């Protein structure tokens, strides 16, 4: 295991490292691409209703408010849904849901705004139809 003072600390900032040295550092930290069980999002295994199943409904598809054995509420909005989020400026911006996950703090989403900005850990309470 690499701790403080590992390869990255010895060789300087990551942007100054060669690609080979960066790969070596990533593998030493156990972050290599051979990790098959990494969940990087992009799908919503917990969502019951996907956008292609929602023909004839108004608004984004929603699954029922329910909990499974984990005790965490299922996300209401499916991956691919278009929702609105209030920006810091006070205006609403349209965004697409890229990922939805159950968490102890309630459903959390990764959303992509029209300008291409991706925001992770967006709580469901911040989303508007």
Image: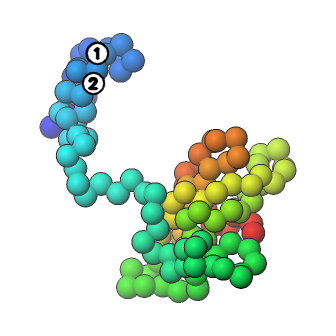
Residue 91 seen from this side: yes
Q: Work out whether 43 lies above or below 76.
A: above
Q: Work out whether 79 lies above or below 87.
A: below
Q: Residue at x 74, y 74 (%)?
A: 59
Q: Residue at x 84, y 50 (%)?
A: 91
The x and y percentages for residue 41 are 43, 57
- Crowding around mark 2 (Cα neighbors within 10 Å: few <14, some 14 to 19, many 20+) is some
Quarter occupied by residue 30: top left
Left or right: 32 as drawn, with respect to 116:
left
The x and y percentages for residue 116 are 64, 41
Q: Mark 2 points at which residue?
A: 22
Q: Work out whether 8 lies above or below 48.
A: above
The x and y percentages for residue 90 are 84, 50
Left or right: 36 as drawn, with respect to 121:
left
Q: Is mark 2 on a helix, strand or loop?
A: helix
Quarter occupied by residue 82: bottom right
- Tag 2 near tag 1, CB within 8 Å: yes
Q: Residue at x 77, y 46 (%)?
A: 88
Quarter occupied by residue 64: bottom right
Residue 122 seen from this side: no
Residue 18's disc is: 1
Residue 54's disc is: none
Residue furthest toward the left?
1
Left or right: 122 as drawn, with respect to 19:
right
The x and y percentages for residue 92 are 81, 54
């Amino acid at each position: 295991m690499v701790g403080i003072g590992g390869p990255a600390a010895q060789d300087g900032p990551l942007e100054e490292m060669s690609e080979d040295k960066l790969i070596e550092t990533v593998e030493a930290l156990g972050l290599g691409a051979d990790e098959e069980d990494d969940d990087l999002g992009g799908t919503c295994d917990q969502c019951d209703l996907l956008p292609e199943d929602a023909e004839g409904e108004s608004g984004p598809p929603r699954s029922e408010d329910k909990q499974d054995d984990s005790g965490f509420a299922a996300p209401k909005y499916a991956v691919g849904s278009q929702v609105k989020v209030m920006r810091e400026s006070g205006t609403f911006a349209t965004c697409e849901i890229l990922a939805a996950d159950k968490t102890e703090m309630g459903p959390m989403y990764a959303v992509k705004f029209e300008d291409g900005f991706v925001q992770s850990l967006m709580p469901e309470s911040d989303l508007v139809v």
